[in-house]
Amino acid sequence: MDSPGISADILTQISMLKSEWDRVRILSAENDARLWRKLRLDWNYHSNHIEGNTLTYGETELLLISGKTTGQHDIREFEEMKAHDVAIQHVRDLAADASRQLTEGDVRDLNRILLKEPFWKEAITPSGAASRKQIIPGDYKATPNNVRTATGEIFEFATPEETPRQMQELVSWFRDQLENEDVNLIRVLAVFHHRFSVTHPFDDGNGRTMRLIVNYALMRKGWMPIVIRTEDKKAYLGALSAADAGNLEPFTEFLELQVVRSLELGIKAARGEELEEPEDWMKEMELFVRANLTKEGPAPRLDAALREQWLNHSIFPLLDAVLLKVQPLKKVFSLVDYEIRSSYGGGFSSKPSKKDYIASAFKIAGNQESFQVKLALELKTFSGAGIPPFDLAFDLIIKVELSRYQLIGPGIPDQMPLLRYDNPLSNVQIEQLSSSIARHVFEQVKNKAVPA
């Protein structure tokens, strides 16, 4: 019997897609290679990116396919991407071996493969003091690894003393569930993922480890592996938070959507159809350009000429893309518009051009070494049926320094690095950033638009 609250429509869709996948999943060598190239790159890129790795999709492809590195990244980011790639192959091998079941040792081995070697990590003591702790790959935590939430509260995972017993019980339960043909597999995966998350057995790599095990189970049972994308991180963590509060249905439904997407991809591959997403060719072009760039020199300071180039090739296209993506909301808001404000108090109406806004902000800032320009996106007077009117506002901040700048705002990763003025945002970056910002705006609108 289906669990209450799960959409009957999506369960029907999954059933139909799984039947079709079972019919076509013996792929030709060419189609199998195409499918696994895409899965390999997407899985490595997104699972690491969710955890803060800053390699771009193109840099990930260059590293894993060509063995080359580019970009200004910590060496550990390259190493963790390569280690994750090894872990994926290990999971594929485990899933393909029908003679053996998953063990607790396999879980620890995956973490050991991901982290490779011991390292030191910044930590906070229970009293709140800054500290450092050594991370031992594959070892369960020896000290608490609780985290402070965005609200300032402490979320407590299992204690070090509780962890071995909880992991033994969880893996044993999971193994039994995978041998039961009558269970709802996606529901089982939701329970496993959440229980693993609240145990948080390792000092690092918990998210990547549990996503690998989820895909081990899917592949072992004849399903396609799923890829939780960076742009879905907010929904992913939000659904997990609901599970923390005792409601597993949002997370189960989130996983169902990922399963639909993965089955559709596998079926397309089996039929010999194009697997590229709309922006994939742009990722490939970005890869080509990065592979053929000479080594970057020192970042130049921002002068009038460079400022004009930067605005015209990076900032204005990004702002245009964001506004274009949120334009459909004009049908349910009386106003969707923005204004620019500098950190020196200059406010500008939405009448002049965007170039005039920012030029004015620079003029006000003068020769200051650091200042901010804020794009205030305003959505006014929601007019949805049966829902009280409301307003929303979102700030996209451009933090300007002498030779680099930073973008801060809704949907933009906290780890977004400082960018050079002389390296224009690529089409891929503009598409990814504008989509992430617009998606965040839309999610906030949906959350707010709840009938009274």
Image (cartoon, rainbow, N blue to C red):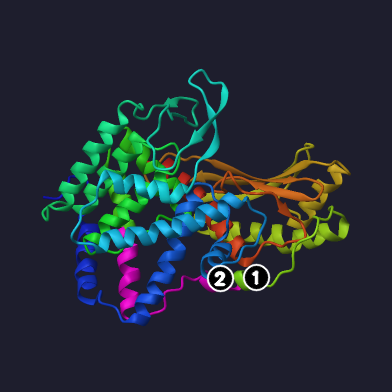
Considering the numbered disc 2 on the image, is that residue within a helix, a strand or a loop?
A: helix
Q: Main secondary structure of the magenta part?
A: helix
**Amino acid type of the residue tagged 2 in the rendering:** Ser
Asked if disc 2 and disc 1 are in contact, CB closer than 8 Å, the reply is yes
Tell me the magenta residue range: 259-285
Residue 51 percent across, percent down from the top left: 49, 47
Residue 115 visible (yes or no): yes
Q: Residue 100: x and y, percent?
A: 20, 56
Q: Was residue 263 drawn as part of the magenta stretch in this picture?
A: yes
Under circle 1, the secondary element is helix
Q: Extreme top residue here?
A: 127
Q: Is residue 22 above or below residue 109?
A: below
Q: Which residue in the rendered view is the most extreme toward the front?
A: 117
The residue that label 2 is drawn on is 66
Q: Describe residue 105's horizontal placement relative to residue 116 as left or right.
A: left
Q: Residues within 10 Å of mark 2 (few under 14, many from 20)?
A: few
Which residue sits at x=39%, y=59%? 88
Note whether 7 is above or below 431 in the view shown. above
- What is the quadrant of the C terminus in the image? top left
Query: Gap between marks 2 and 1, in whole Å?
Result: 10 Å
Q: Amino acid at mark 1?
A: Ala
Q: Position of residue 421 (x, y in %)?
A: 76, 56
Residue 284 covered by magenta stretch? yes
As drawn, 271 above or below 74: below
Instruction: Say left or right for 390 vs 249.
Output: right
Foreground residue among 230 and 57: 57
In the rendered structure, find residue 291 and report the number of the disc placed on it.
Answer: 1
Taking the spot 27% from the left edge, 44% from the top edge, the residue there is 104
Residue 246 visible somewhere in the drawing: no
Q: Nearer the viewer, residue 258 or 145?
A: 145
Q: Nearer the viewer, mark 2 or mark 1?
A: 2
